Image: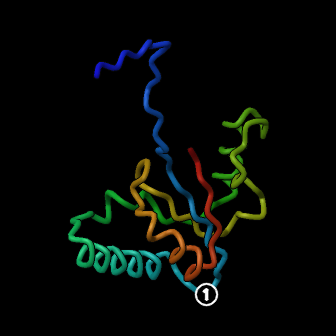
Amino acid sequence: MRLIFNIHSFVDVITNSSSELFICDRKDISIEFINIILKELLNLYNNASGNELVYENVIGSVDIYTQEKYLNDYENTDNGKYMRGYEKEENIGKIFIESKDDNSIPYAFFDFIEDVFDSQRYHLG
């Protein structure tokens, strides 16, 4: 038996690469504490999965969102026209946990980060 296909068009594969941002709303923990917990979580993940992910390649930064960063974000989004959603004045003073690169934070970490650090996740695309 012979099958013949008429090709109408070619389509590239579309992937879902994205960076993530978690906004921590807890006032009782420090940046240092968050880094310690995330490093330990990564060690557990590596041991359980056989991976060898390096913290510096997974987490981009853990930092406080300042007034200066807010104003810079606002200006760089055409004065708020193209904002991603996290650039809010109410987030000033909160701790931001950013992924290092697209898909660098394992999906298995998402719920943990959201629950333990009382954070909201923003998918930055």
The residue under the point 45% across, 18% down is 10
Callout 1: few (<14), some (14-19), or many (20+) C-alpha neighbours within 10 Å? few
- Quadrant of the rendered structure where residue 43 is? bottom left
* 27, 107: nearer the viewer: 107
Q: Position of residue 18 (x, y in %)?
A: 50, 47
Residue at the spot of label 1:
28
Q: Position of residue 121 (x, y in %)?
A: 61, 63
How many marks the image carries: the answer is: 1
The residue under the point 73% across, 37% down is 82
The residue under the point 78% across, 40% down is 80
* 42, 36: nearer the viewer: 42
Residue with the most extreme bottom position: 28
- Quadrant of the rendered structure where residue 25 is? bottom right
Q: Quadrant of the N terminus?
A: top left
Lateral position of residue 3 relative to residue 120, left or right: left
Q: Secondary structure at mark 1?
A: loop
The residue under the point 59% across, 80% down is 115
Residue 21's place in the image compared with 17, above or below, is below
Q: Position of residue 96 (x, y in %)?
A: 57, 64
Q: Position of residue 94 (x, y in %)?
A: 65, 69
Residue 77's place in the image compared with 19, above or below, is above
Lateral position of residue 40 relative to residue 110, left or right: left
Q: Quadrant of the C terminus?
A: top right
Q: Amino acid at mark 1?
A: Asp
* 73, 82: nearer the viewer: 82
Residue 124's place in the image compared with 78, above or below, is below
